[in-house]
Image: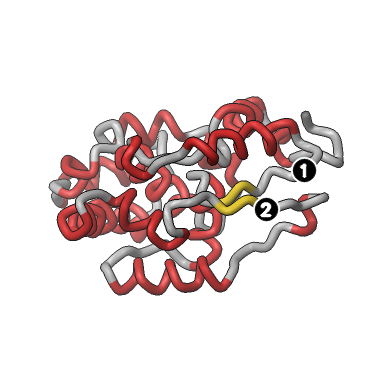
């Protein structure tokens, strides 16, 4: 699954291969999982996905199992604990953003009933099916990710620039960016046909 005609980025590490084969591009309607990817994609800013995926369990442990309610209540002592935790990226701005993003996430849930309903409305609840022949064709961002990023920032989210948002869309199945030669492209497309925002 990792020749040059497929999603060869997954071959960089066993963690990425597993992530690619089981998660990347699968449509997600579960708010806890969506929050997890808000955290992980934001943590990735300026770094490689390899760096983040290898720390995924560290983030899960440090951030209360990616529970936005608990993370939103983190105080100064929690921030210091996170900054001393070698299992995550110990960047002060990112640590503060995790907490602020949890608070913004809860506000979106209150307004829309769920974060899933809010974020999936940008694509009318239907995963976008791309048809790339090679990884070189994939964009880093789009006009849609620009629009979502702007809206998220207005709602108080940080470390959610357009490139990060596009990666979030890929991760959570809003976009199927597996190349056509990759077996996962067809598998994810079938999942998209059955997807419902309210299934989470």
Examine the image and state in which quarter residue 89 appears.
Answer: top left
Q: Residues within 10 Å of mark 2 (few under 14, many from 20)?
A: some
The residue under the point 59% across, 68% down is 142
Of residue 155 and residue 124, the one placed in the foreground of this image is 124
Q: Residues within 10 Å of mark 1 (few under 14, many from 20)?
A: some
Q: Is residue 97 left or right of residue 138?
A: left
Q: For the point 37% across and 56% down, which residue is it?
A: 119
Q: Residue 98 location in percent, x, y?
A: 31, 52
Residue located beneath label 2 in the image: 130
Badge 2 or badge 1: first in the primary sequence:
2
Q: Quadrant of the C terminus?
A: top left
93 on left or right of 21: left
Left of 116 or right of it: where is 138?
Answer: right
| Position in image of residue 83 (x %, y %) | 32, 46
Please provide percent x and percent y for residue 13: 67, 31
SS for callout 1 = loop
């Amino acid at each position: 699954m990792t020749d040059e005609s497929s999603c060869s980025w997954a071959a960089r590490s066993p963690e990425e291969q597993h992530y690619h084969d089981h998660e990347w591009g699968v449509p997600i309607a579960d708010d806890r999982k969506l929050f997890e990817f808000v955290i992980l994609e934001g943590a990735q800013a300026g770094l490689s996905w390899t760096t983040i995926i290898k720390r995924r369990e560290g983030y899960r442990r440090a951030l209360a199992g990616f529970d936005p309610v608990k993370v939103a209540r983190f105080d100064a002592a929690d921030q210091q604990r996170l900054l001393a935790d070698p299992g995550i990226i110990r960047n002060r701005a990112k640590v503060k953003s995790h907490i602020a993003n949890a608070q913004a996430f809860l506000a979106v849930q209150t307004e829309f009933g769920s974060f899933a309903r809010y974020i999936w409305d940008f694509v009318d609840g239907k995963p976008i099916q791309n048809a790339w022949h090679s990884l070189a064709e994939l964009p880093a961002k789009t006009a849609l990710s620009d629009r979502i990023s702007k809206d998220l920032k207005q709602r108080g989210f940080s470390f959610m620039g357009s490139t990060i948002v596009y990666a979030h869309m890929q991760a959570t199945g809003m976009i199927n960016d597996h190349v056509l030669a990759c077996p996962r492209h067809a598998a994810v497309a079938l999942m998209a046909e059955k997807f419902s925002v309210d299934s989470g």
